[in-house]
Amino acid sequence: MVAISIENVWKYYGETVAVQDLNLECRDGEFVCVLGPSGCGKSSTMRMLAGLEHISAGQILFGDKRINELAPKDRDIAMVFENYALYPHKTVAENMANPLRMAGVDKATVTKKVLDAAKLLEIDHLLDRKPVELSGGQKQRVAIGRVIVRQPAVYLFDEPIAHLDAKLRARMRTELKHLQQHQGVTTVYVTHDQLEALSMADRIAVMHDGVLQQFGTPAEIYSNP
Ligand code: ADP
Ligand code: ADP
């Protein structure tokens, strides 16, 4: 597990300032939601956290290491984006098992972890199906399952449940929060949905036009909107 510090971070795309002097810290094991409307710089922030995007100025630390000094294999970050990509020719079980198998985990442990995660996400009856035989919501849960079996040090979620229907979203909010607390994994979760942020976050970072406007607990944000 690890704490994350975003220190005086800027992101430019040509003339566009997407993120402006952002300072944000996520404590070890904390669940931080980044909340804001479309275009406010949420995804740019996540891509920089994931090491997928160059940081124009400032720095991001994982623990005491700067992200650009960490080799990708040492980053121990799991990401779930809105547009999931599953292996179409593999079963649900194989899709979920794949990261663990790649890491050389023994078969019995893989089977147990896949089954545990599948039960939690209520997709254990779908383990033998192929992605084409699943609904969008089921596929999204498989994509989440594929990262939670790894139990990484950091989760980065970018609108992971935005495509699901309201009922499933409500259930997934509870499940993801429960899982994160259970595993104690430091989590940054991007959403434009205030209810999602209020119900899941330890602290909420409210962004607007690339600027952090508020950072506090749901109670602090809610009492001071
Ligand atoms: P959000 O995730 O909150 O919708 P983004 O981080 O995607 O916000 O975008 C922030 C700003 O940066 C927007 O004005 C967007 O148009 C711009 N932007 C994002 N990605 C790029 C890019 N690859 N090239 C140019 N501009 C971009
Ligand atoms: P293989 O031909 O390699 O046995 P499988 O589809 O049977 O392919 O399984 C791939 C991996 O997915 C297995 O190593 C196992 O860990 C996991 N797996 C398969 N089926 C299940 C299941 N019903 N419950 C839990 N894990 C499963």
Image (cartoon, helix red, strand yellow):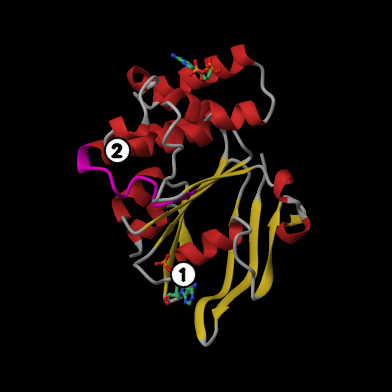
Q: Mark 2 sits on what residue?
A: 137
Taking the image as four quarters, which one is ligand 1 found in? bottom left
- Residue 192 versus residue 3 in the image, above or below: below
- Magenta highlight: main SS: loop
Residue 5 in which image quadrant: bottom right
- Residue 188 versus residue 10 in the image, above or below: above
Instruction: Give the residue at x 38% y 27%.
Output: 121
Most extreme residue toward the front is 89
Q: Where in the figure is residue 177, as x and y percent of width and height?
A: 42, 36
Total numbered circles? 2
For disc 2, does the CB lie below 8 Å from ligand 2?
A: no
Q: Which of marks 1 and 2 is nearer the N terminus?
A: 1
For disc 1, does the CB lie below 8 Å from ligand 1?
A: yes
How far apart marks 1 and 2 lie (CA) works out to: 26 Å
- Please state, as top left, top right, bottom left or bottom right, where the N terminus lies in the image: top right
In the image, is 90 to the left or to the right of 134?
Answer: right
Instruction: Give the residue at x 27% y 43%.
Output: 164
User: Is residue 57 or residue 106 the one in the foreground?
Assistant: 106
* Residue at disc 1, secondary structure: loop
Residue 14 in which image quadrant: bottom right
Q: Where in the figure is residue 126, as x and y percent of width and height?
A: 34, 22
The amino acid on which the numbered mark 2 sits, given as a three-letter code, is Gly
The amino acid on which the numbered mark 1 sits, given as a three-letter code, is Gly
Q: Give the range drawn in magenta.
A: 157-167
Q: How crowded is mark 1: few (under 14 residues within 10 Å), some or many (20 or more)?
A: many
* Residue at disc 2, secondary structure: helix
In the image, is 210 to the left or to the right of 164?
Answer: right
Q: Mark 1 sits on what residue?
A: 41
Instruction: Give the residue at x 58% y 19%.
Output: 110
In the image, is 178 to the left or to the right of 182?
Answer: left
